[in-house]
Image (cartoon, rainbow, N blue to C red):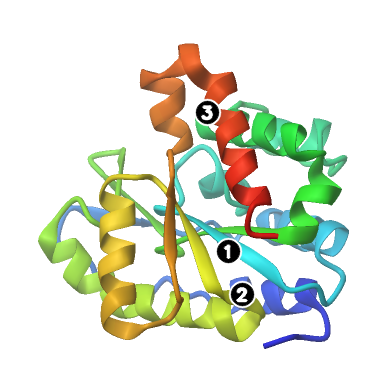
Amino acid sequence: MAMDNWSEKIIDYYSLLTDDWILPEGIELLFPYRDRMVMDAVTSFYHKYFSDSNQRVLILGINPGRFGAGVTGIPFTDPVILEENCGIDNAFQKKHELSALFVLEMIDTFGGFDAFYRHFFIQAVCPLGFTKEGINCNYYDYNDLYDCVFPHILNNLRSFVDMGCRSDVVFSLGKGKNFKFLNDINKKYSIFKEVLPLPHPRWVMQYNRKKKAEQIQNIVATLESVL
């Protein structure tokens, strides 16, 4: 479904997120969007790169973490990248996030922020993140957590198609559990025609860094193949 203006749809999407999720005991919700500074950053970012009606391919990470989207509100965009690479001044603590650095190199290899975001929309399977004992955790780490957040996940995935994402293909950032869970959901609910896996940035940066350049080239080639 085409739309009039991506930026306004995305800003509305963030504005409608709520923090009234019921979670298992010991699990805390990451919810940066009540912070005016976060919403200012989100508004500036999406006005800059998404003020058009182009249909985009969706790339889905797992869920936001404490140091990337958990700070800026923008997936895989840390405070340093937001200011130095996107030109959006911010008062967040200037600290890099590992996955964001990988995505930055991937975007640069693709041709830069304008070229990349003209075609792609990076989000997450689960729109909000979680911590347990102060450490990031993923929506699939605990069965009771997954059961609690599944309705939010399903609504989230459907909302992206309604927003204007292509429904013929979606990419999973993560070839392991994120791909498995997203693929299983899609098989049951038929939201997208095909789910394609990509290596997760953190996996590359932590466990396969020597082949980072090769991984980035492969990811970019795969992304270009669906355009």
Residue at left offset 48%, top offset 11%: 210
Q: Is residue 201 above or below residue 19?
A: above
Q: Are marks 3 and 1 in contact (CB under 8 Å)?
A: no
Note whether residue 139 is visible. Answer: no
- Please give the label number shown on residue 166: 2
Tell me where residue 204 sits by quadrant.
top left
Q: Give the amino acid at mark 2.
A: Arg
Total numbered circles: 3
Question: Marks 2 and 1, Cα distance to the nearest angstrom?
Answer: 7 Å
Left or right: residue 88 versus residue 30 is right
Quadrant where the C terminus is found in the figure: bottom right
Q: Give the amino acid at mark 1.
A: Leu
Camera-side mark, 3 or 1:
3
Tell me where residue 90 sits by quadrant.
top right
For disc 1, the marked residue is 58
Quadrant where the N terminus is found in the figure: bottom right
Tell me if mark 2 has few (under 14), some (14-19) or many (20+) residues whose alpha carbon lies within 10 angstroms of its own.
some
Tell me if mark 1 has few (under 14), some (14-19) or many (20+) residues whose alpha carbon lies within 10 angstroms of its own.
many
Q: Nearer the viewer, residue 76 or 192?
A: 192
Q: Give the amino acid at mark 3.
A: Gln
Instruction: Residue 26 in the image: state x and y as whole percent.
Output: 17, 53
For disc 3, the marked residue is 215
Instruction: Residue 114 in the image: state x and y as whole percent.
Output: 85, 49
SS at badge 1: strand
